Image: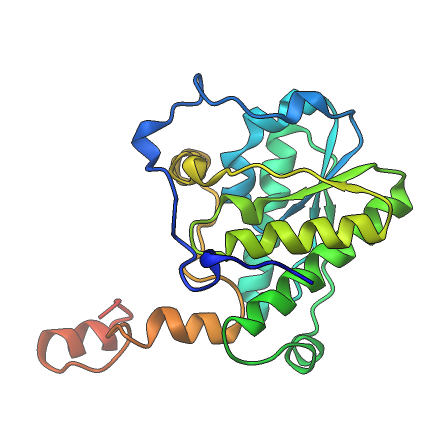
Amino acid sequence: MTELGSNLTNPKSKVASAPDFGLSTLNFGLSTLDSSLLVHVCCGECVAAILEPLRCVGAFTPFFHNPNIQPLLEFRRRAKSVQVLAEQERLDAVVDMAYDPKAFLRAVPWDRPERCLACYRMRLGETARVAAERGCTAITTTLLVSVHQYHAAVRAIGEEEAAARGLSFHYEDWRPLAAHGLQEAKRRSLYRQQYCGCIFSEEERFAPTRVHLFRGGAAARRDNTGGDA
């Protein structure tokens, strides 16, 4: 069974602050792998965050498979951001454009943390399947970049799904590079998402805010002209 640890209740626990880390001082273990790594990627921003350590591998293949991302235009924006970065960096990315929100909503619980764990398993399980099919020996994921994920669960589920296919899961705590990914996304004009992916996470992100709520007065006039009130 997956050992979730304390990070299950606090995804941001034990994250080193970005200013304490520079790309020149980070020491990742990727150079110990052979060149058959399939990298599950969730968006262009997170791929950009770890391009430099990934290059230590030699050849690696980004794999976009994210059935959790909704609605359709959000899904396309994130897939496109990966494709744009792949084109810029001449990476041979595999992008799964299948979009089926009904299947996703049927497959996962609707509440945290069970929803997130099922989502990780869905994505990393498919990554392991494709990696084995392509003759890769290891997988990893850009979910390890985000400070908003259940980090220990990502690692445990990744290891389980990789082992089930006779593969290894390469673990790195890439959260210190999250800020670098944001900077790179801005520099490269990549799309930057504002929530994790599913409609539940969108609600969790925006429900506490007043984004697009009617406020009257000048704000209402901006609404009527298409502004972001």
Task: Give the residue drawn at x 44%, y 34%.
Answer: 184
Position of residue 180 relative to residue 78, above or below, is above
Q: Position of residue 168 (x, y in %)?
A: 77, 40
Task: Give the residue drawn at x 64%, y 80%.
Answer: 105
Task: Give the residue drawn at x 60%, y 58%.
Answer: 3
Q: Is residue 154 left or right of residue 225?
A: right
Position of residue 169 relative to residue 9, above or below, is above
Number of disc labels? 0
Position of residue 193 relative to residue 177, above or below, is below
Nearest to the observer: residue 62 or residue 226: 62
**Res 106 seen here:** yes
Q: Position of residue 162 (x, y in %)?
A: 77, 48
Q: Position of residue 97 (x, y in %)?
A: 72, 59
Q: Position of residue 219 (x, y in %)?
A: 15, 74
Position of residue 28 relative to residue 4, above or below, is above
Q: Is residue 25 left or right of residue 50?
A: left
Q: Quadrant of residue 86?
A: top right
Q: Quadrant of residue 9?
A: bottom left
Nearest to the observer: residue 196 or residue 75: 196
Q: Quadrant of the N terminus?
A: bottom right
